[in-house]
Amino acid sequence: MSSGRDVISKAGGENFPVAACLLPRAYRDHLLAVYGFARFVDDIGDIGGIGGIDGIGDAAGPGERLRLLDAVEADLDRLYAGEAPRLGPVGALARVVEAHAVPAGPFHRLVEANRRDQAVTRYETFDDLLDYCALSANPVGHIVLHVFGEVTPSRLALSDRVCSALQIVEHCQDVGEDCRRGRVYLPEEDLCRLGCAEADLAGRTTPAPLRRVVALQAGRAARLLEEGRPLVASLTGFARVAVAGYVAGGLATVAALRRFDHDVLGRAVRPRRTRLLATWLRTFTTGW
């Protein structure tokens, strides 16, 4: 199970500042608790890596992963019933839920996304992938808006565009890693249409057809970010600080993918810190 220090370390490796240093300590702590839970559930879905619970080690099979996800859902139920959770990352949510009246639904959808990962490893169309993002990414945006007390129907819809874009960008960066886990998040119809064989995803170099597929997804993510950026302009104060960071992280990563000609197998594509900060400042000050 990840410690608080592990969570902070992992958060520092993201494309966007999960808990920007400009935020007050309470907000940082609450956002890190949400991030820690999301990573905890992802780790279960990917490798079952929460050794010490029910005797499961760090490389559980799909059936055991589902059993562990059941345990997480049961612990969420305990939390919302006013009982003490048994799992650390769920327990860390208690203050977040109490302070901001965050509903249970978004947390359960994050668990459901990892259930889907045990059964669905390919996505036929981009719309199919967006349906997955509605479980795997968009709930995080809903939780963040609750943390800042900024929930409205229009903001939730804009947040969904931003969060889906961030998930798609991450899929572009992690093509090789996902393939090694037996998963392909690039739409099959795009792979076929652009002449990219699935075997191309497992190589050490990025062939031209795969670069074209990644470029297509990155372009779609950029459009989603543009559609979602009015969310920043609708916010003020610390909510604007945080959300501008998420949007800027996505935009800066898309720029990094373009800079490296969408070579996602030959290198680790990450945004430059200077580009990220400049993009955040522009997004924060202009709302656009």
Image (cartoon, helix red, strand yellow):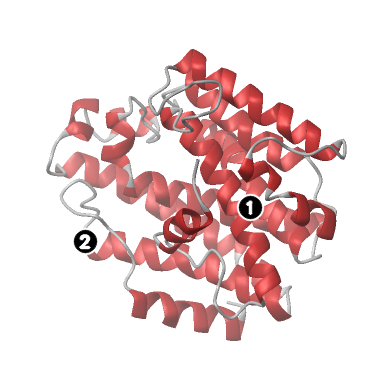
Observer able to see residue 230 = no
Q: Which residue is mark 1?
A: 34
Occupied quadrant, residue 246: bottom right
x, y percent for residue 196: 22, 32
Pick the quarter of the image with the C terminus.
bottom right
Which of the pair 192/129 is nearer the observer?
129
Which of the pair 205/34 is nearer the observer?
34
Q: Tell me the crowding category of disc 1: few under 14, some 14 to 19, or many 20 or more residues within 10 angstroms, Cα based.
A: many
- Amino acid type of the residue that numbered disc 1 sits on in the rendered structure: Val
Residue depicted at 26% across the width and 39% down the height: 176
The mark found on residue 268 in the picture is none
Which of the pair 250/44 is nearer the observer?
44
Dot placed on the residue nearer the N-terminal end, 1 or 2: 1
- As drawn, the residue found furthest toward the bottom would be 285
x, y percent for residue 106: 71, 42
- Amino acid type of the residue that numbered disc 2 sits on in the rendered structure: Phe
Residue depicted at 15% across the width and 49% down the height: 266
Observer able to see residue 81 = yes
Q: Secondary structure at mark 2?
A: loop
Q: Which residue is mark 2?
A: 260
Residue 278 vertical placement versus 223 (above, below): below
**Total marks placed:** 2
Occupied quadrant, residue 159: bottom right
